Amino acid sequence: MVVEWLEFALDDPIIFIGVLLFITKIVKHKLKFHKDDFIFKIGKFSENLYRRFVSMFHYKKTIPLAIAGLLILHAFSDLMGFAFLLTVGKENLYIEQLGTEHLSFYGLYAQDSEGLGLPSKLSLLAGYALNALSFIVLLIIPSLAWFRVFYQKEMHFSRIFLPLVYSSIVSFALLPAYSLRQINEPGIIGIDVVANSLFKSFSIANFLVHDKAALISVVAIVSIAVGITAYFLSANTRIKKELYAISILIGVLFYTKYIYIFFSSLFNYLSNNIILFILTPHFLIAVVLSVIAVLSVLFYIGGYLMFVYELVMEYHKRKWSEPIDEELVRVITKIRSAERKAVKLMRNKDTNLLS
């Protein structure tokens, strides 16, 4: 079932990440573009990542990292549908079953901007744009952090990303345009992400600025100022690393909220049905659901703690350059070696078939 879930849930997100990484590589290194090579590399990226991920379950030392990856990729694939909805406005089959109306940020901006002057419209546009960016940033950062541990490679980010990260996060923190909550539909487990009008959104700065239109402008200015400040501070390499570490911490807190809400929804569903069936002739259903409940606790809570542990150890290793777990590194090296041998064997077979 785990393998089937991986194949179903991860294929599209992996290909999406592969496209972004390959386009970035083309732009950065000015590689020659050829459509066959492009498609081939995206397919290979998905295939190699899937094979390497499954192989992590074959070694004791990499099982915690693999379980943490299951949890992170589960959250990523779930929230990606909402990210597409909030930015583009297109619902998928899952979101259509939730029963509540879901508006995109563009739809909310079109409603809220009626009758406003140009300065207010620009501030409102900045508010929604930064909130949309914050959702994508908070979604991607923890995933990239896990991929860094997974591949045991240093990730290099340009300074230009820091203003986008911090301005969007500050905008969301001061005046959020979306919220995460449990699904209220009976029989459906999970989390719902709902976009909110900035004019109706609660802000921690309400006690300072009472007029909502003025508050939106102030938040937009403060957010952009924080982003610019982060850019200039990142000229110092040490500060740049700390800023990225703080952004990862914020992303983990966002995932923590997601996992808490999702797990609460799941556990409420399981506990209610266990109580419903335990004293009936169908008590075996309650027994099975009890086993699922125990496994869910181990997966969500255990997987989250493993993820946090891996990040802390990786940060500790990067900051003080101390090898935390040489055995883990050796296991990952073995996996890479096995992959290279498999690729070489496949090439030899192809060569023999052609000859």
Image (spheres, helix red, strand yellow):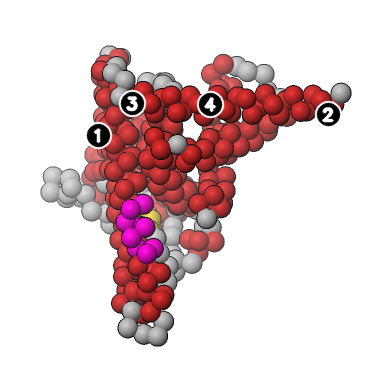
- Residue extending farthest right: 355
User: Which of these two is toward me, 326 or 86?
Assistant: 326
Tell me whether circle 4 and circle 3 mark residues in contact (CB < 8 Å). Answer: no
Of label 1 and label 2, which has the lower sequence position?
A: 1
Tell me whether circle 1 and circle 3 mark residues in contact (CB < 8 Å). Answer: no
Residue placed under numbered mark 4 in the picture: 336
| Secondary structure state at the residue bearing disc 2 | helix
What x and y, as percent, mark residue 164? 37, 31
Of label 3 and label 2, which has the lower sequence position?
A: 3
Residue placed under numbered mark 1 in the picture: 222
Q: How many marks?
A: 4
Q: Nearer the viewer, mark 1 or mark 3?
A: 3
| Secondary structure state at the residue bearing disc 1 | helix
Of label 1 and label 4, which has the lower sequence position?
A: 1
Tell me whether circle 4 and circle 2 mark residues in contact (CB < 8 Å). Answer: no
Residue placed under numbered mark 2 in the picture: 353
What x and y, as percent, mark residue 120? 33, 43
User: Which of these two is toward me, 186 or 329?
Assistant: 329
> Is residue 293 within the magenta segment?
yes
